[in-house]
Image (cartoon, grey):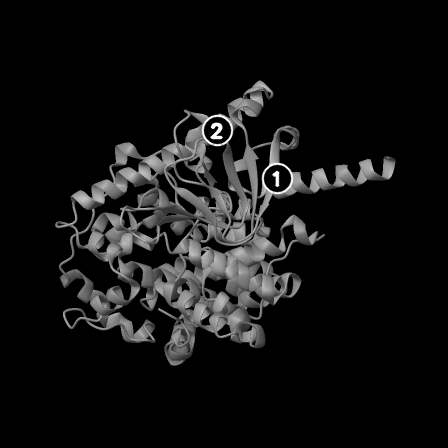
Amino acid sequence: MAPGKKHKEIDLDEQIEFLKKVSFFHGFDDHELKQFLQVSKWLRVPPHTVIIKENTTERAFYILVRGEVGVEKRLPGKAKPIQLTTLVTGDCFGEMALVTEIKRTADVVAITESFILRVEPEIVSTSNVFLQLKFYKRFCERLVSRLDLANKRVAGRDGEEANPSILQKVLSDADLSEAEEKPSKPPVKPGLGIERRPEKPEKSRITISLPPLPDKDQRQTPAKLHHRVHPEAVLPVNPAVAAELSSMMKGGAGIDNTRRLADLISLDPVLSCRIIQTANSPFYRRANTVGTVPLAMVIIGVKQVQEVLVNTIRAARSTQAFSGFAAVSRDFWQHAVVVGKIAEMLRDVIRVNTSADLYLCGLLHDLGMLVLDGMSPNFYPQFVRPSEEMQDMVRVERDYIGVDHGQAGVWLAEGIGLPQPYLDVMHFHHLPEKATTNQVPVALVNLANIFASMKGACMGQPQVTVQDAARSFAWALIEEHHRPFQEVNVPQFINSFSAELDKTWASITGDILL
């Protein structure tokens, strides 16, 4: 009996550690999760299994711990049901059963093999009162989020004729690409960067109906915003990268060409995060935190990598970065890759040592923008035609949303379990003087961010100059950690490095998929 009991306790501990990574249980402590597991039932559901059937009555509520399910609705006269939405890890469904005994309004069918927690309302109501309060609080948050999304969709339909961005949302990917290639808008050159600088002024002449700027009085406190950041939240993926990966995996080349697979993953911040997050999950029991994409791929294996990619890309189809404004999206994804590459170049030219993956530090430094975009979707589209007020992005984010993208990125990265250097770079890449740890990566990404913006690889119009580069506190941090650099003339270094960027810009931007 003793050996069996010990094995059961180990399994329970592993279940608790796994649930901590699920967004629904963010903030639950070990004791509460143990209680919850004792009053719920694990289900392992094969693909194509109907979990909830329309027009049936039951009081069970489900939490998707791992996998993907589709919500389907059958319409009169239609042979096949239509898929209303796709739910992924961390989502819940059937929640109205906790409120009232109404018939189910749709089918819920497993798309992939899924692990689900089935919760009976009577069981929850007899649990510890503190567990009940936390559970119902999280349950209400999910309902409010869905109601808010529904309201936005209704508002979007009401304003379809006045707002062209709403029309973009209902176009297929092919239609959208076709619309973007109309001669009324200058074509985007594959290299962007230097070639793109003359195109920046064109944005001011494009007639686009922007959504209204958020009301400053409606911004939320950092505490409330922090509570809305969940590690399993669905974030948008670069559609060009997603298309390339999907084509590659569909043809089976993903297994044979792992180098190309890694290169494509490393072009997108969200995909890179999900692969690293998976490698750091309790399933792999790593003593040390995994911090790079190649190492993460080795640990979890190519087959699991492809499963993570498929699930992440499929989930991202339900989201649209920056309200569908393609120019802002392209700027964001290009800027992330360019900053990562320039940070590596600076390290090599200065010959300063750091153990952090500088490319990934640069790629992820603005990850918080995707988080804030989900909370305030009307904010970043303003960079299609930025006003004078929008020059200081960090200040404006705090004024209109309530927190800047650096802090939002840290909150997400903490939940995902990214190593500390990435958190420090996210937090301080605009204010390197405030960094107390990982100062070299912070300094190099700060400078890479400035150089990228100087070359036009930024959101909106470039707002930095050579003088801004020379005044950066990052130089002081580099001198402190790399004594030979104290003898370097910083203005001359800036000019020579800028000239080198001009020479190599085609190679820096040539493989970016946009």
Residue, disc 1 = 42
Residue 320 visible in the shown view? yes
Q: Locate residue 154, reporting x and y percent.
A: 23, 41
Q: Residue furthest bottom?
A: 503
Q: Locate residue 458, reporting x and y percent.
A: 33, 62
Total numbered labels placed on residues in the image: 2
Task: Identify the secondary structure beneath mark 2.
Answer: loop
Side of 475 where 131 appears, left or right: right
Q: Locate residue 456, reporting x and y percent.
A: 31, 67
User: Which callout, 2 or 1, points at the residue further toward the start of the chain?
Assistant: 1
Image quadrant in which you'd find residue 470: bottom left
Residue type indicated by callout 2: Arg
Can you tell which mark lies on residue 59? 2
Q: Point out the image quarter for the N terminus.
A: top right
Q: Is residue 82 above or below residue 299?
A: above
Q: Nearer the viewer, residue 480 or 507?
A: 507
Cβ atoms at labels 2 and 1 below 8 Å apart: no
Image quadrant in which you'd find residue 352: bottom right
Side of 260 where 82 appears, left or right: left
Residue type indicated by callout 1: Trp
